[in-house]
Image (cartoon, rainbow, N blue to C red):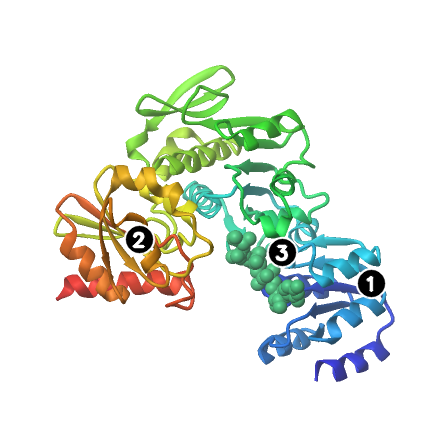
Amino acid sequence: MAVCIAAVFLCMQSAPFLGILGAGTSGIAAAKLAAHQGANAVVIDTSMTIPVSTQEELEGAGILFIAGQEAERFLQRETFERIITSPGIAPHAPLRAISRARNLALCGELQFAWEQTNNPCIAITGTNGKTTTTTLIEHLLRMNNRNAMAVGNIGVPLSQAVMHADATTTFVIEASSYQLDTVTTFAPDIAIILNITPDHLSYHGSFANYVTSKWKIFANQKPTNTLILNADDAHAANAASVARSMVRYMSTSKKCDGAFVWGDNIMLSEQQQEEIVMPVRKLGLPGVHNQYNSMAALVAARAVEIHSANIRSSLETFQGVEHRLEVVGTFRDVQYVNDSKATNVNATWYALGSYDKPIVWIAGGRGDNNDYDSLNDVVERNVAAIVCIGEEQQSIFNHWCTKKRCVKADTLLHAVEAAAAIAQPHSVVLFSPACKSFDMFTNFEHRGETFKRLVGHHFAQ
Ligand code: UMA
């Protein structure tokens, strides 16, 4: 069907194509933005199973759609003014390889969308904490009467936001390494690098390539722009040696130009002046990693001249992101926390270090070559008992059963019941799976919703 319509279109159109690779969220949004601006847009996708509704949506917007086996042939054959790629299409994927071999000008959806807007942009990257910090900055700006919209990897492509937002909106962009890999002139007013540890290596090919992609967040910034770096993370902090923008820092271990933890307080240092912003314990979010996220947001907010007294109340009231250390409730003096977004061991490492009370940890799901050794220390220190579920149930059980009380549960319902029976007053039941959700659930959101519902039912009885 797509191919027949393609033939009709091809007869009618002679301008070179603007080719968009990928018919997911970002490809569709980029194509609509391009078509809106009069480009001869075509979306190309190698999948054989794209829903009919996607095809209808694109064709309804006057956008040509080529899918399946014809995709590569089309890209090989036709004339393109430019190619815009979706972030999930890896550099070694056939569509990217053909574009390279044909020497076609290629950029990513983030770059394309950024070219179409003059709105202020704050971009956040890092291996962990991007979503929380993006949401926190959006919250902070809104609490202080600024229009702000969280976009990018968080789920709303910048292309979509550009089409609908007014000129006063600040785009707070969660920028993944995939998105940054394909920018060329992208230069946000404020860029933040929270931390860089190995991740997505099969996509980037090496850790060095991954770091290079992350550093593209500031590569085109001007001296009037701001770059905020984690002073305690060498791969982030080293960016200062090549940045042209104004560099500010956050640290939990030393004084720096920016925000830092000193004693019990979060401090701000600007133009040689230090001020106490707030006690660490008053932050709305728990854990050391959230001190970095909060301080990054603090420095960004100061860069857009929000008064620190107003920033303080925003940092106190922020309740976090759904499914990320989300407090479900406190029942019989036990706090229940949903951290279903922890789909890897690293995310769970942060979660297990976030509480100063004993944890009954519900863990498991589908593994991804999980290396549990990296959790040994934090489990030893903070975990009272482990409830093991999902495909990783036996592995987790075997890993800790000689050191900690471990029980197995066949369903999440049984896991909640077991955890509730084990947990002593003044403790936390933490659902932080360290695994993917696909063995038992549609996605991590479905898993988190289920956990919250089961906890609610258990205590309603
Ligand atoms: N496709 C091909 N050929 C290929 C590979 C893929 O045609 O070789 C097609 C697929 O058939 C599919 C489309 O490309 O139709 C998917 O494109 P995509 O993977 O870029 O997915 P989008 O729906 O556009 O979502 C992307 C981000 N996905 C990825 O980076 C994998 C979303 O981040 C993001 O929210 C969205 O754009 C809006 O900006 C998700 C993600 O997992 C949450 N990100 C990674 C992460 O957080 O770890 C980086």
Going by the image, does 341 lie left or right of 407?
right
Labels 3 and 2: the sequence-earlier one: 3
Tell me if label 2 and label 1 are in contact, CB under 8 Å: no
Q: Position of residue 54 (x, y in %)?
A: 60, 75
Name the amino acid, label 2. Answer: Asn
The image quarter containing residue 389 is: bottom left
Q: Position of residue 167 (x, y in %)?
A: 60, 49
Q: Position of residue 390 (x, y in %)?
A: 34, 63
Height in image: 341 above or below 263? below
Q: Is mark 3 within 8 Å of ligand 1?
A: yes
Mark 2 crowd level (few <14, some 14–19, many ≥20, 10 Å Cα)? few
Can residue 153 be seen in the rendering of this structure? no
Ligand 1 visible in quadrant: bottom right
Q: Residue at x 76, y 84 (%)?
A: 4
Which residue in the protein does label 3 denote? 87
Q: Residue at x 52, y 41 (%)?
A: 126
Height in image: 359 above or below 81? above
Callout 3 secondary element: loop
Tag of residue 80:
1
Which residue in the protein does label 2 denote? 398
Q: Is mark 1 within 8 Å of ligand 1?
A: no
Can residue 344 be seen in the rendering of this structure? yes
Q: Quadrant of the N terminus?
A: bottom right
- C-alpha span from label 1 to label 3: 19 Å
Of labels 3 and 2, the one closer to you: 2
Of labels 1 and 3, the one closer to you: 3
Going by the image, does 441 lie left or right of 32?
left
Residue 377 or 431: which is nearer the viewer? 377
Labels 2 and 1: the sequence-earlier one: 1
Q: Position of residue 57 (x, y in %)?
A: 62, 75
- C-alpha span from label 3 to label 2: 38 Å
